Image (spheres, rainbow, N blue to C red):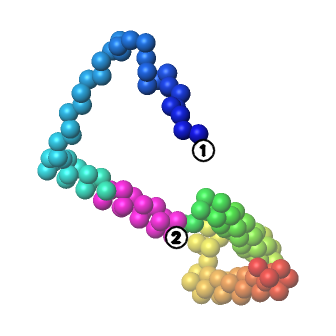
Amino acid sequence: MLRGTPARSPSVYSSGPPSVMPTPVDPSPHPSRGSRQQVAEDLVRSLLGATLHSLDMVAHGSEEQRKNLDTKTRDALETNSQQYKDAERELFGRELETDDWDRMDEDERSENTKKLMTRLKEKRDERVNETGT
């Protein structure tokens, strides 16, 4: 094993005194009560923020899940709306307006509502049997 003097590092040994003398750093004082309070409040805020984010993810899912759910909901609403219109045309020969329902007496409105709901249920059952959704 060779034992010799290690080569000098240029950063350790310079050709002259440093051009700028480092300024001494005062040791940091103990945190004051106010700054400890601030640190504690910041920690609590951070924990609450993380908790709220976690709750939001559990309640609403990720952005991708939200978009997927929005798409499925929109499709279901469109399907249901179209089936409602189809059922009205089948039962009444046309789509009914609010005024049409308003002009019906209570018994007629009740009977037509039952017919419409029965037909909508049949359409939903047909759709479920065909598509599973």
- Which image quadrant: the N terminus? top right
SS assignment for the magenta stretch, majority: helix
The residue sitting at 53% across, 34% down in the picture is 4
Task: In the rendered view, tell whether residue 58 sits above or below residue 38.
Answer: below
- The one nearer the camera, 18 or 33, is 18
Task: In the rendered view, tell whether residue 88 sits above or below residue 119.
Answer: above
The kind of residue on which mark 2 rests is Val
Displayed quadrant of residue 82? bottom right
- The one nearer the camera, 43 or 74, is 43
Which of labels 1 and 2 is toward the front?
A: 1
Residue at label 1?
1
Q: Which residues are magenta?
A: 44-59
- The one nearer the camera, 32 or 133, is 32
- Residue 130 lies, in percent from the top left, at 85, 82
The residue sitting at 20% across, 38% down in the picture is 27
Task: In the rendered view, tell whether residue 11 sits above or below residue 45.
Answer: above
The reply to whether the magenta stretch includes residue 57 is yes
The reply to whether the magenta stretch includes residue 31 is no
Q: Categorize mark 1 by other alpha carbons within 10 Å: few (<14), some (14-19), many (20+).
A: few
The residue sitting at 65% across, 60% down in the picture is 64
Q: Please, what secondary structure does the residue beneath circle 2 have?
A: helix
The kind of residue on which mark 1 rests is Met
